Amino acid sequence: MNERDITPKSLFLNRRQWLATAGALAATPALAQASDAPTPKDAIISYNNFYEFGTGKSDPARTAGSLRTAPWSVEIGGLCAKSGTLALDDILRRHPRGEHVYRMRCVEGWSMVIPWLGFPLADLLKAAEPLSSAKYVAFQTLYDPAQMPGQKSDVLQWPYVEGLRLDEAMHPLTLLATGLYGEELLPQNGAPLRLVVPWKYGFKSIKSIVKITLTETQPPTSWNLSAPNEYGFYSNVNPQVDHPRWSQATERRIGEFFRRDTLLFNGYAEQVAHMYTGMDLTANF
């Protein structure tokens, strides 16, 4: 993991200090550039995609209060030596969380910089001891229409499911997050446990996870099931692969007026591009 993608809490909580320090050390890779200052918390918690609580960007903040996030457990199974259902409290006791500031890019063309509180997914997977036959990791969101009113609609097949190749899941940039800006996640942001994969479009970072399964075959994913010509399994951020209905060449950072160029792998090519050597990223979008 490159140190420029992790910013200590003491820096990002004080924006002015953070910017001053970044400017002074711009020649070193220790800090993100000033243009990657974290998005204000108010924007992060009020502008969300979480279809379980509605399709509008303000719907989750308005309706997600119905979600009960404690107690919470996660079922881990499939091709692993140590399967079982783990209480989230036990998971967090075993896997201490740290601060990770990541750029996040939505397929619709907007982006944020979010200071997450979490730990590498690899830590949890290693504890489950994947078998040699495991090649993929599948994830599933809670299915409970009483708590998640958006699941009463047919906008997607429920429950929401996602997946990664095992090497992607084991990459140190891939997080299980439980908080942002040093505080616990709110329901609209995927509480109490969500995936964060910063080099992929945001819909890959599945929220409110209740099940993780190691598999030999590529698992189904919700948006690929819904519109396979628009949403591929990999969904790596790629300015050269347009969505059928809009360009992906530029993006609008929330809080900024002008659009900026979209970076391949959302700017994390140095860390992750080797995993796709030899792949046609146009065909495997």
Image (cartoon, rainbow, N blue to C red):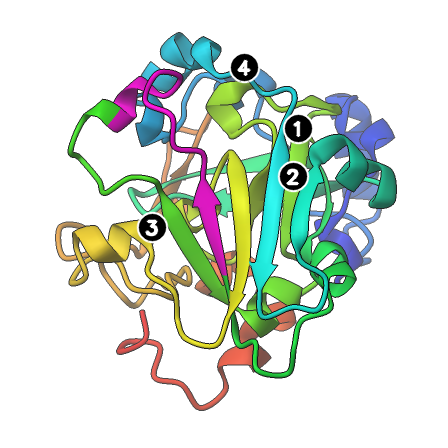
Q: Amino acid at mark 1?
A: Leu
Between disc 2 and disc 3, whose residue precedes? 2
Q: Which residue is mark 2?
A: 177
Nearer to us in this view, 122 or 81: 81
Q: Is residue 140 magenta?
A: yes
Nearer to us in this view, 24 or 72: 72
Q: Amino acid at mark 2?
A: Ala
Between disc 1 and disc 3, whose residue precedes? 1
Question: Is residue 217 shown to the viewer in this render?
Answer: yes
Between disc 4 and disc 1, whose residue precedes? 4
Residues in magenta, as a range: 138-151
Q: Amino acid at mark 3?
A: Thr
Label of residue 180 in the image: 1
Closer mark to the observer between disc 3 and disc 4: 4
Q: Is residue 244 magenta?
A: no
Label of residue 12 in the image: none
Residue that sits furthest to the bottom in the current view: 278
Q: Which residue is mark 4?
A: 42
| Quarter of the image with the C terminus in it | bottom left
